[in-house]
Protein backbone atom coordinates (compact mmCIF):
# COMPACT_ATOMS: atom_id res chain seq x y z
CA UNK A 1 0.00 0.00 0.00
CA UNK A 2 1.17 3.53 -0.74
CA UNK A 3 1.57 5.45 2.48
CA UNK A 4 4.93 7.17 1.98
CA UNK A 5 5.09 10.76 3.18
CA UNK A 6 8.21 12.84 2.53
CA UNK A 7 9.37 14.82 5.52
CA UNK A 8 12.88 15.68 4.48
CA UNK A 9 14.35 18.74 2.82
CA UNK A 10 16.19 16.69 0.22
CA UNK A 11 14.24 14.73 -2.35
CA UNK A 12 15.70 12.35 -4.89
CA UNK A 13 13.64 10.62 -7.54
CA UNK A 14 14.43 8.67 -10.67
CA UNK A 15 11.34 10.23 -12.27
CA UNK A 16 8.32 12.35 -11.32
CA UNK A 17 5.08 13.84 -12.54
CA UNK A 18 3.07 16.78 -11.23
CA UNK A 19 -0.72 16.51 -11.09
CA UNK A 20 -2.79 19.68 -11.28
CA UNK A 21 -6.51 20.33 -11.21
CA UNK A 22 -7.88 22.20 -14.23
CA UNK A 23 -11.14 23.94 -13.23
CA UNK A 24 -12.59 23.98 -16.76
CA UNK A 25 -11.36 22.08 -19.78
CA UNK A 26 -10.76 25.37 -21.64
CA UNK A 27 -8.87 26.89 -18.69
CA UNK A 28 -5.27 28.03 -19.10
CA UNK A 29 -4.77 27.98 -15.31
CA UNK A 30 -4.35 24.92 -13.15
CA UNK A 31 -3.93 24.31 -9.43
CA UNK A 32 -0.98 22.02 -8.64
CA UNK A 33 -2.15 19.27 -6.28
CA UNK A 34 0.78 16.93 -5.84
CA UNK A 35 4.03 15.61 -7.17
CA UNK A 36 4.30 11.84 -7.54
CA UNK A 37 7.89 10.69 -7.37
CA UNK A 38 9.31 7.34 -8.38
CA UNK A 39 12.50 5.57 -7.28
CA UNK A 40 13.32 2.23 -8.89
CA UNK A 41 12.43 -0.62 -6.55
CA UNK A 42 10.45 1.56 -4.12
CA UNK A 43 6.84 2.58 -3.59
CA UNK A 44 5.83 5.92 -5.14
CA UNK A 45 6.06 9.01 -2.96
CA UNK A 46 3.57 11.87 -2.78
CA UNK A 47 4.71 15.44 -2.23
CA UNK A 48 1.54 17.42 -1.51
CA UNK A 49 1.32 20.91 -2.98
CA UNK A 50 -2.02 21.54 -1.25
CA UNK A 51 -2.98 20.50 2.28
CA UNK A 52 -3.04 16.69 2.37
CA UNK A 53 -6.55 16.88 3.81
CA UNK A 54 -7.76 18.65 0.66
CA UNK A 55 -9.14 21.98 -0.48
CA UNK A 56 -12.61 23.42 -0.82
CA UNK A 57 -14.07 22.89 -4.29
CA UNK A 58 -16.10 26.13 -3.97
CA UNK A 59 -15.41 28.30 -7.01
CA UNK A 60 -13.31 25.57 -8.63
CA UNK A 61 -15.84 22.97 -9.70
CA UNK A 62 -19.47 22.03 -9.28
CA UNK A 63 -18.85 18.51 -10.58
CA UNK A 64 -19.50 16.17 -7.60
CA UNK A 65 -16.79 13.71 -8.71
CA UNK A 66 -14.02 16.31 -8.82
CA UNK A 67 -15.36 18.08 -5.72
CA UNK A 68 -14.83 14.80 -3.86
CA UNK A 69 -11.30 14.52 -5.31
CA UNK A 70 -10.43 18.05 -4.12
CA UNK A 71 -11.87 17.46 -0.63
CA UNK A 72 -9.91 14.21 -0.15
CA UNK A 73 -7.04 13.98 -2.64
CA UNK A 74 -4.97 11.63 -0.47
CA UNK A 75 -7.58 8.87 -0.52
CA UNK A 76 -8.34 9.38 -4.21
CA UNK A 77 -4.75 9.27 -5.47
CA UNK A 78 -3.72 6.45 -3.14
CA UNK A 79 -6.66 4.31 -4.30
CA UNK A 80 -6.22 5.10 -8.03
CA UNK A 81 -2.47 4.57 -8.05
CA UNK A 82 -2.69 1.32 -6.06
CA UNK A 83 -5.25 0.07 -8.63
CA UNK A 84 -2.95 0.84 -11.58
CA UNK A 85 0.14 -0.59 -9.88
CA UNK A 86 -1.78 -3.79 -9.16
CA UNK A 87 -3.06 -3.97 -12.77
CA UNK A 88 0.38 -3.45 -14.33
CA UNK A 89 2.52 -5.18 -11.69
CA UNK A 90 4.93 -2.23 -11.78
CA UNK A 91 5.11 1.07 -9.88
CA UNK A 92 6.55 2.89 -12.89
CA UNK A 93 3.97 1.51 -15.33
CA UNK A 94 1.20 2.17 -12.77
CA UNK A 95 2.18 5.84 -12.61
CA UNK A 96 2.37 6.00 -16.41
CA UNK A 97 -1.09 4.44 -16.64
CA UNK A 98 -2.45 7.01 -14.15
CA UNK A 99 -0.99 9.79 -16.31
CA UNK A 100 -2.42 8.32 -19.53
CA UNK A 101 -5.93 7.72 -18.14
CA UNK A 102 -6.50 11.06 -16.42
CA UNK A 103 -5.83 14.09 -18.58
CA UNK A 104 -9.03 16.13 -18.39
CA UNK A 105 -9.65 17.98 -15.14
CA UNK A 106 -6.66 16.23 -13.61
CA UNK A 107 -3.69 17.13 -15.78
CA UNK A 108 -0.30 15.47 -15.39
CA UNK A 109 3.06 16.60 -16.67
CA UNK A 110 4.95 14.07 -18.72
CA UNK A 111 6.79 11.51 -16.60
CA UNK A 112 10.12 13.36 -16.28
CA UNK A 113 13.15 11.11 -15.90
CA UNK A 114 15.74 12.85 -13.75
CA UNK A 115 18.74 11.50 -15.65
CA UNK A 116 17.35 13.24 -18.74
CA UNK A 117 16.22 16.58 -17.25
CA UNK A 118 17.85 17.48 -13.92
CA UNK A 119 16.33 20.27 -11.82
CA UNK A 120 18.03 23.53 -12.73
CA UNK A 121 15.83 25.76 -10.57
CA UNK A 122 13.15 25.30 -7.91
CA UNK A 123 9.67 24.31 -9.01
CA UNK A 124 7.37 27.31 -8.96
CA UNK A 125 3.78 26.73 -7.91
CA UNK A 126 0.79 28.97 -7.39
CA UNK A 127 -0.63 28.26 -3.96
CA UNK A 128 -4.37 27.85 -3.51
CA UNK A 129 -5.74 30.92 -1.77
CA UNK A 130 -3.00 33.16 -3.19
CA UNK A 131 -5.10 33.92 -6.26
Image (tube, rainbow, N blue to C red):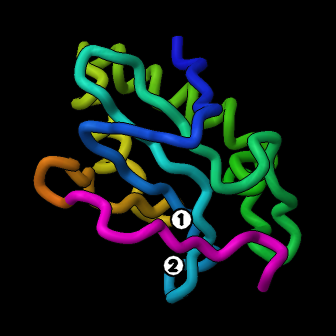
Image-quadrant location for residue 59: bottom right
Disc number at residue 105?
1
Q: With 29 as the anchor, is 43 left or right in this view?
A: left
Q: With 10 as the anchor, is 113 left or right in this view?
A: left
User: Is the residue marked by circle 2 packed among few (<14), some (14-19), or many (20+) residues within 10 Å?
Assistant: few
Residue 120 located within the stretch drawn in magenta: yes
Q: Nearer the viewer, residue 39 or 128?
A: 39
Disc number at residue 58?
none
**Residue that appears at 30% across and 28% down:** 39
Image-quadrant location for residue 31: bottom right
Q: Nearer the viewer, residue 10 or 73?
A: 10
Q: Secondary structure at mark 2?
A: loop
Q: Tell me the quadrant of the picture where the C terminus can be found.
A: bottom right
Q: With 44 as the anchor, is 100 left or right in this view?
A: left
Q: Which residue does the numbered mark 2 point to in the structure image?
A: 25
Q: Position of residue 15 (x, y in %)?
A: 27, 43
Q: Are marks 2 and 1 in contact (CB under 8 Å)?
A: yes
Magenta region, main secondary structure: loop
**Residue that appears at 23% across and 30% down:** 93
Q: Position of residue 102 (x, y in %)?
A: 41, 52
Q: Secondary structure at mark 1?
A: loop
User: Magenta region: which residues?
Assistant: 118-131
Amino acid sequence: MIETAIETTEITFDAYTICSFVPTLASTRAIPLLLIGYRHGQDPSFVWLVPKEGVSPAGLTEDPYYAKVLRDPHTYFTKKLNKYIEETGSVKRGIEMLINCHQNHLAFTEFVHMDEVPFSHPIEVELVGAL
